[in-house]
Every structure is written in structure tokens, then in C-alpha cells.
């Protein structure tokens, strides 16, 4: 059974989760891109990674 669920992307740092909004704010300080644009990319990347990893495990 393959149920779809909403996933909030997080990065694991020193054994605890970190929200993508925190990472987006950090990256905004060193770039000219808005934190909302960076967060959109981070969410998209995490979804793409999830899909590719599921394909490698034979899940579809």
C-alpha cells in the first residue's frame, strides 16, 4: 500500500532536525536571492531526492 503524505523537508544537523526556513535565511545572507525563492528550491530538491531514492529502492 502506497499512501501519500505531506513531508516537511528538514536537514539533519548534529542529530537533530533543522527546518528549511532556517537554511533559507542563512543562504539569503550570502546571496541576492530571496529567502522564499531559496526555500522553494530546497523543497523542490528534497522532493526530487525523495523520488530518486524511492526509485532506487524499487518503489513507484
Image (cartoon, rainbow, N blue to C red):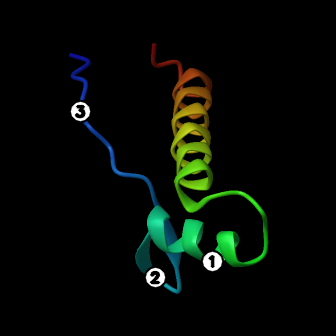
Q: Which residue is mark 3?
A: 5
**Residue at disc 1, secondary structure:** helix
Query: Which is closer to the viewer, label 1 or label 2?
Result: 1
Marked residue nearer the N-terminal end (1 or 2)? 2
Horizontal side of 2 relative to 53 (left or right) equals left
Q: Are marks 1 and 2 in contact (CB under 8 Å)?
A: no
Which residue: 54% across, 53% down?
39
**Residue at disc 2, secondary structure:** loop
Q: Which residue is mark 1?
A: 26
Q: Position of residue 44 (x, y in %)?
A: 56, 37
Horizontal side of 3 relative to 14 (left or right) equals left
Which residue: 54% across, 44% down?
40
Q: Position of residue 42 (x, y in %)?
A: 58, 50
Return the residue nearer the eye: 17 or 43.
43
Q: Which residue is mark 2?
A: 15
Q: Position of residue 17 (x, y in %)?
A: 41, 73
Q: How would you rate the neighbour count of disc 3 (Cα within 10 Å): few for under 14, some for 14-19, many for 20 or more? A: few
Q: Is residue 56 above or below residue 8?
A: above
Horizontal side of 8 relative to 37 (left or right) equals left
Marked residue nearer the N-terminal end (3 or 2)? 3
Amino acid at each position: 500500500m502506497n499512501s501519500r503524505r505531506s513531508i516537511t523537508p528538514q536537514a539533519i544537523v548534529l542529530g537533530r532536525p533543522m527546518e528549511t526556513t532556517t537554511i533559507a535565511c542563512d543562504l539569503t545572507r550570502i546571496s541576492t536571492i530571496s529567502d522564499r525563492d531559496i526555500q522553494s528550491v530546497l523543497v523542490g530538491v528534497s522532493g526530487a531526492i525523495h523520488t530518486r531514492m524511492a526509485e532506487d529502492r524499487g518503489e513507484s
